[in-house]
Image (spheres, rainbow, N blue to C red):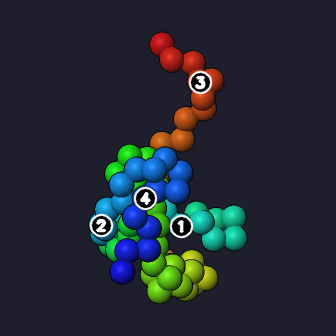
């Protein structure tokens, strides 16, 4: 059932994990917890099996029903650091 044995980007090993998935849909990013996914142990790239991907799309399409939000610090690369 392994769809990817090796990462397309860095040739790293792929592991099956339950993750917080980052999913881009129509220019928007959503995060989904407890998603079964294949994750590159080297670069962290996430791969989803087709049914999982479909489910994530479904969730993204109904993102107005998402009730929880998470905040992330957003830095500027050129920010002043003292
Ligand atoms: Zn990789």
Q: Residue at x 60, y 29 (%)?
A: 77
Label 1 residue SS: strand
Mark 2 and mark 3 in contact? Answer it, CB < 8 Å: no
The residue closer to the viewer here, 69 or 1, is 1
Q: Residues within 10 Å of mark 1 (few under 14, many from 20)?
A: some
Whichever of labels 2 and 3 marks the residue nearer the N terminus, that label is: 2
Mark-to-mark CA distance, 3 and 1: 27 Å
Label 4 residue SS: loop
Which residue in the protein does label 2 denote?
A: 17
Q: Quadrant of residue 24?
A: bottom right
Residue 45's label in the rendered image is none
Q: Residues within 10 Å of mark 3 (few under 14, many from 20)?
A: few
Mark 4 or 2: the one toward you: 4
Mark 1 and mark 2 in contact? Answer it, CB < 8 Å: no
User: How many numbered discs sit on the rendered protein?
Assistant: 4
The residue closer to the viewer here, 74 or 4, is 4
Which residue in the protein does label 1 denote?
A: 23
Whichever of labels 4 and 3 marks the residue nearer the N terminus, that label is: 4
Residue 79's label in the rendered image is 3
Mark-to-mark CA distance, 4 and 2: 15 Å
Left or right of 75 in this view: 7: left
Label 2 residue SS: strand
Q: Is mark 2 within 8 Å of ligand 1?
A: no
Which residue in the protein does label 4 denote?
A: 6
């Amino acid at each position: 059932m392994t769809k990817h044995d090796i990462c397309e980007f860095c040739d790293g090993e792929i592991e099956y994990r339950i993750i917080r998935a980052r999913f881009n849909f129509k220019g928007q990013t959503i995060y989904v917890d407890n998603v079964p996914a294949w994750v590159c142990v080297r670069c962290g790239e996430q791969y989803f099996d087709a049914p999982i991907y479909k489910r994530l799309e479904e969730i993204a399409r109904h993102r107005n029903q998402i009730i929880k939000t998470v905040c992330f610090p957003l830095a500027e690369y050129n920010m002043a650091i003292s």
